[in-house]
Each structure stands twice: as structure tokens, then as C-alpha cells.
């Protein structure tokens, strides 16, 4: 619901490692009016079972830049624990002694604990900015 003086924003998250929406991810929305302006925190939402935030705050008049902060760490930790459990069960069932795919690299459990996306907006336009997420990478784009 944008007007001629404001832009609007929506988002969703798809976990590309499993081909499903990412549910339960906190998303914060911030805005500023100009490159040199300070960021104004507007509030946030949490992704639903479809990976969507349906109640992001309205952007203030004069917004030129928007930032979406996705707190993905808890989601990825939960997904990783579930995946490790499934791999363990499979490994036990297959009686494998040494499966390179299951080795721990020694790195932090979550490589990207958060994802921050900043983009420019113009009044009257709607911006749908999906996040495609996996444990070791992500991408974003302007959707429709």
C-alpha cells in the first residue's frame, strides 16, 4: 500500500539448502532520508511458515534508503542440528566408518550469523526483496 510520497517493502526467505521457506527468522527494518542521514529503526517482523514477513512497518515519507537486517543465526543453528541428526541416523544405518561429507571443518557453526541488505527506493514504488539463504551463502534480488 504505497502512496505517491512513500515506498513500500516486503520480503521473504527461501532456504535453498532444503528448498523450503525459512520460518521464524527475525527481520528488522530501518530507513533513512538521504545518504548522509542517520538510520531510523522502524521495527520488525518474524517470517511465517511461508517464509514471509507480512507486517513490516510502513516507511516514513522521504525515505531514500532501506536496510533489512535478517537475524539468521538461530534459524541456521536449528537447521544444522536437524541436518546433523539426520546425517547421524543415516550414517548409523549405512554403517559408514568415514564419510567426508560429515566431517566437521572446525569452523564456527554458523558462517553468516546475520545478513544486512541495503537498497535505494523511490516514492510510490513497491520493493519486494527476497533472501535466498543457505549455510554458506546467500543472494538477494528485487522481486515483484
Image (cartoon, rainbow, N blue to C red):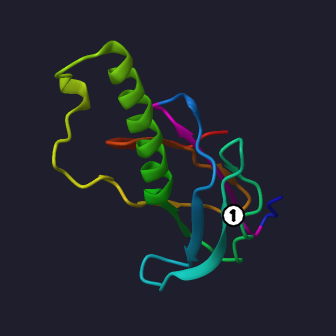
| On screen, residue 11 above or below 59 | above
The x, y position of residue 52, in whole percent, is: 69, 48
Residue 118 appears in the figure = no
| On screen, residue 122 above or below 84 | below
Q: Nearer the viewer, residue 14 or 41?
A: 14
Residue at figure coordinates x 65%, y 76% from the top left? 43
- Residue 8 inside the magenta-drawn segment: yes
**Residue farthest bottom in this picture:** 38
The x, y position of residue 119, in whole percent, is: 49, 59
The x, y position of residue 77, in whole percent, is: 42, 52
66 horizontally vs 45: left or right: left
The N terminus lies in quadrant? bottom right
The C terminus lies in quadrant? top right
Secondary structure beneath label 1: loop
Residue 92 appears in the figure = yes
Q: Write the start and end of the magenta stretch as one range.
A: 5-17
| On screen, residue 94 above or below 2 | above
Disc 1 residue crowd, few under 14, some 14–19, many 20+, Cα 10 Å = some
- Residue 95 inside the magenta-drawn segment: no
Q: Dividing the picture into quarters, in which one does residue 139 lie?
A: top left
Count of all numbered marks drawn on residues in the image: 1
Residue at the disc numbered 1: 123
Residue at figure coordinates x 71%, y 77% from the top left? 61
Q: Main secondary structure of the magenta part?
A: strand
115 horizontally vs 1: left or right: left
**Residue farthest top in this picture:** 94
106 horizontally vs 29: left or right: left
The x, y position of residue 51, in whole percent, is: 65, 45
Q: Nearer the viewer, residue 5 or 111?
A: 111
Amino acid at each position: 500500500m504505497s502512496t505517491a510520497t512513500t515506498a513500500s517493502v516486503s520480503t521473504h526467505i527461501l532456504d535453498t539448502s532444503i528448498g523450503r521457506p525459512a520460518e521464524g527468522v527475525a527481520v528488522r527494518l530501518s530507513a533513512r532520508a538521504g545518504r548522509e542521514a542517520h538510520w531510523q529503526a522502524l521495527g520488525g517482523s518474524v517470517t511465517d511458515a511461508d517464509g514471509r514477513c507480512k507486517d513490516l512497518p510502513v516507511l516514513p515519507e522521504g525515505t531514500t534508503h532501506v536496510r533489512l537486517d535478517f537475524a539468521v543465526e538461530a534459524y541456521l543453528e536449528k537447521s544444522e542440528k536437524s541436518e546433523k541428526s539426520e546425517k547421524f541416523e543415516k550414517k548409523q544405518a549405512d554403517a559408514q566408518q568415514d564419510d567426508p561429507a560429515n566431517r566437521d571443518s572446525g569452523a564456527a557453526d554458523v558462517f553468516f550469523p546475520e545478513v544486512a541488505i541495503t537498497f535505494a527506493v523511490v516514492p510510490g514504488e513497491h520493493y519486494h526483496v527476497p533472501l535466498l539463504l543457505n549455510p554458506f551463502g546467500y543472494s538477494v534480488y528485487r522481486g515483484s
